Amino acid sequence: MRLQNLEINGFKSFSKKTTLEFQNSIISIVGPNGSGKSNVVEALRFVLGEQSIKSMRGSSGSDLIFKGSKTLPKSSRASVTIYFDNSDKVFKLFQEGKENINLNYDTISISREVYPDGLNKYILNGTEVRLKDINNLLASVNIGSSHHHIISQGEADRILNASSKDRREMVEDALGLKIYQYKIKEAGRKLERTTNNMKEVSLLRRENAPHLNFLKKQVDKFEKAKEMQVSLLSLYKEYLKKESIYLNKEKSNLFNEKSRIEEELENVKHKISSIDEVNEKKESEKEKELKILEEKIHGIRSVKNEIERKLGRMEGMIEMEERRKEQTPEIIIKNPEEIKAIFEEINSEIEEAMIEENIAEIKIILLRIKEILNNVDQHKSVMEHSSSNSEVEELRKNQQKILDEMKKIEDEEKNIFEKVVDLKSEINKENEALHLKEKEKFNYRVKHQELTSSLNLISVREEGLKREEETFENEIKEGGALIGGEILSYKNFETDGEINRNNQEELKRKIERIKIKLEDVGSSGGSEIIKEFEEVSQRDNFLAKEMEDLTKSIESLHALMADLKEKIDIEFKEGVKKINVEFTNLFSLMFGGGSAHLSLVTENKRRKGEEGGEVEDEEEIAFEQGIEINVSLPHKKVKELNALSGGERSLTSIALLFAMSQVNPPPFLVLDETDAALDEANSRKYGDMLEKLSNHSQLIVVTHNRETMSRAGILYGVTVGSDGASKLLSVKLDDAVAIAK
């Protein structure tokens, strides 16, 4: 048994939850007309995914919901659930592009709910799913959407009235080939989506191509810039390293030279200062001594002149006295006051000289003169009373003393003069030495000027070096702006030998040329453009890979569809052969002879041109295969279906449907009053076929035929209660027979 239960709740005439159990191979549903027994069949159609509301005798989804009665309220929804046995895990769920999934449930429940607004819900084992999933699941157990397994009253000869193409689809569905059709349709939809995706991808690539080409050109420029940056970095390493060595060396040399010059300049200043101090010292001592000696001589000469003048007067007086003595033998000094006045005058002059000149040696001499004059003064009274001879003698004695002292003064003057001469000689010598010192000082001053000039020149060179260092730092900054932080790697560059400034200038010119080229290329923002180029390239590569994958997918889908069509064609032809065997046997059984079989026919169909006209090229003609039904009644020459009577058509369609069910039995068959047109004899044949079919499928038969009822294991009677709703009564015939006996 595959079908287990059917629960109906709020569906059409069933207001309350009603459960049908399918525990026998043949279940018969009976009841008077209008009781709602066909609603059971429609409930099966509904839960299995029927989309035609009209086929369920309604115009909208709300027509499927119980409308209510005088005693019962209307239902808020209609719900039908069907249960299948899946202990052998035969139910499979088809997955697009993947392996089919075997549902690991012992019982499969499918529910469908409809609401007044027309909303439908499909539920598989408690999980809401799509109608597509339900169809795929049912197709795996040969319950297709053509509903060949549900034959309602008046539709028995539907297969006879169908076109050859539709008839083929019904046969394919009965043969279980619908799952392949689903796969072909799914592959076709996927092919369409893939083709659209391919167009979109192609469009995206075309749209991206100009921008990608622009970015490629920019990247090429930046790649060239990168190469130039590498070359520039190489040149910079050598140039900056040598330049830093040169600057450091120049800085060190200038520092050492400046220190040497400053030290030498300091020594020159010290020597000039020393010469000035010595010269000043010597000049002040010698000249001061010479000045003192010259002042002494001047003082001595002044005193000497005064004494000589006074001495001349004394000689004059002596001469007068001697003349007087010659005239008068005895001359008495009549005016001693005059002599006193002379001595007082000499004494006064000497004292004045002593006051005016503060010289130790002159003082000694003047003291002696003063002592002489004092002696003259002590003897003045004698002279007044002595004779003229004694006076003259006394005067001569004093004169001699004065002359003696005068001699001493002259000797002293001579000594001092000699000292003056010697001192002047020494001063001259010292002046010569001073001149030499001055010359030496001049030389030192010249040297000082030279050193100062050299120091100024060093300052100028320091300023130039400072500018060169600033240029060096600016060069590092400019280089860093062009090639980044790697510019500082010049510090690790190894170099040897002397730094040639000409070579440095040549390196600088090469660097400047590359810098100009880099500035023309414009290296700024290169990383962003390269990043964008990589992103766009990756996107384009992804799209190219996508195009490749889509192309492969299209090829794969075409191959899959071709394989599926080939498989359908092979299995379809094999299935038709099997159906023909069963169809002939059942037809012969139903009609007591005769024959019937299905034949494949080919229909030509011209494809429409772009403007709706037919295409003349024969290769553009599509060939479609359909199915024709061929019958031959016993004792009659009737071979056309249109010539059959209603009963004959009904028996033919039943025979064909039963034959299809025999080849690939569905889990169950629903027959809704398909035996209505049969007479008693044919009803027995119909019942025999039911029993034969029940060996492979469960049969749910809605009937009024007693013969048919007798073949059922369970009878469900449908009645309408006083509340206006359908109800079920069940009877197991075996139990009923036992009770009856």
Image (spheres, helix red, strand yellow):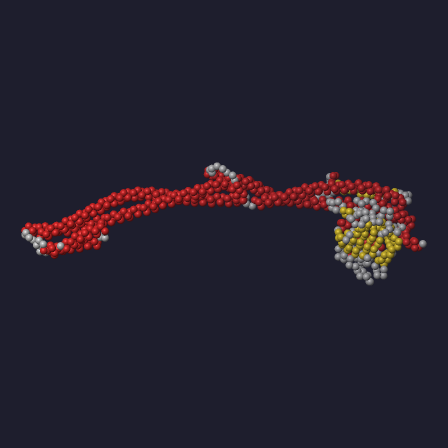
Q: Position of residue 534 (x, y in %)?
A: 61, 44
Q: Position of residue 166 (x, y in %)?
A: 80, 46
Q: Which image quarter: residue 538?
A: top right
Residue 312 seen from this side: no
Residue 196 seen from this side: yes
Front residue of 406/48: it is 406
Front residue of 619/301: it is 301
- Quadrant including the C terminus: bottom right
Q: Residue at x 60, y 45 (%)?
A: 532
Q: Position of residue 52 (x, y in %)?
A: 78, 52
Furthest-top residue in this view: 497
Q: How many marks?
A: 0
Horizontal relation, residue 164 to residue 326: left or right: right
Q: Position of residue 570 (x, y in %)?
A: 80, 40
Horizontal relation, residue 466 to residue 107: left or right: left
Front residue of 90/52: it is 90
Horizontal relation, residue 392 to residue 620: left or right: left
Q: Residue at x 21, y 51 (%)?
A: 364
Q: Residue at x 74, y 45 (%)?
A: 98
Furthest-bottom residue in this view: 71
